[in-house]
Amino acid sequence: GTSEATMGTRISRAKQQLVRGGARFVPATDTDRRERTEAVMRVLYLIFNEGYTASSGESLARRDLSEEAVRLARLLHAADPDNAEAAGLLALMLLIESRHGARTDADGALVPLESQDRTRWDQELIREGTRLLDAVWDPRGTSTGPYQFQAAIAALHAEAPAPELTDWPRIAMLYLWLERLTPTAPVRLSRVVAVARAFGPTRGLTLLDTLCGRHALDRDPLVRHHERAVRAHLTRMTGDTAGAAALYREAATLAANGAERRYLLTEAERADEATT
């Protein structure tokens, strides 16, 4: 170990170097604070997502990461209660976390949103998340940030008592607004699914082709397996089960998460059975 005297010498040397280098410790400006908060929110969102669906390995989720992200998002919201996006991020995490108990079956297999047992969703987390969002939501949408839009989408899922009662047209519209703010591949793919649910699989596939042509979603290594999975899902909705089975298998070969891969292979088998 290092002795206290040695440590003291190192610290005073470091301070002298900072002074020589012209360092000045000044109070943070509002812009500094806002930028720092945005950076912290980005990191918390990444940690939460990695916990929600681990990017590799055999188990679907890493609870330690998602729970830690929620804990830190609570601290951030408490420290900056007037920040609508910090409230939106916490609301988003709570609304997604409310579905945790229904996301896998007894064997650890992935259960997609529309097949989940909604009685297993945590109503207390849903109430808390919805309250947080309602308190900051601007109905005109002029100052609404991406975390609030995502929380609003999660809230619409949470309040639907059954999958067929989901307000898909409103979700599709929220994804369009979100895409304008954060034009990322996952947001675009989610909008395709919402459009297909709201207006039919053919509309969804047409939009998917347009987005792949413009933004190369089908060649993006981060979302390639999601693009194939969405295409497979919509292809099956049109009645082409053989085409869907091939696409599900292709998606499975690209998926790094074991639980996701097993789910996609099961869907391929189901599509095969529907073909014969």
Image (cartoon, rainbow, N blue to C red):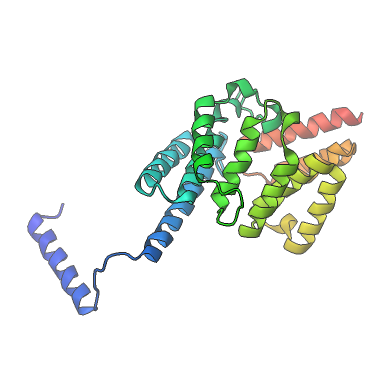
Residue 73, placed above or below residue 124: below
> Where does the image place residue 174, in percent across and percent down from the top left?
67, 48
| 116 relative position to 122: left or right | right
The total number of labels drawn is 0
> Where does the image place residue 270, in percent across and percent down from the top left?
81, 29
Residue 203, placed above or below residue 168: below
- Residue at the spot 41% in from the left edge and 39% down from the top edge: 68
> Where does the image place residue 140, in percent across and percent down from the top left?
61, 52
> Where does the image place residue 148, in percent across and percent down from the top left?
55, 47
In the figure, residue 120 lies in which quadrant? Answer: top right
Residue 81, placed above or below residue 6: above
Note whether residue 221 is visible.
no
Q: Quadrant of the C terminus?
A: top right
- Residue at the spot 70% in from the left edge and 53% down from the top edge: 176
Seen from the viewer's position, the closer of residues 27 and 96 is 27
Note whether residue 29 is visible.
yes
- Residue at the spot 63% in from the left edge and 28% down from the top edge: 109
| 6 relative position to 96: left or right | left
In the figure, residue 177 lies in which quadrant? Answer: bottom right
| 147 relative position to 270: left or right | left
Seen from the viewer's position, the closer of residues 223 and 148 is 148
Seen from the viewer's position, the closer of residues 169 and 217 is 169
In the figure, residue 7 lies in which quadrant? Answer: bottom left
The residue sitting at the left extreme is: 5
The residue sitting at the front extreme is: 140
- Residue at the spot 88% in from the left edge and 39% down from the top edge: 238
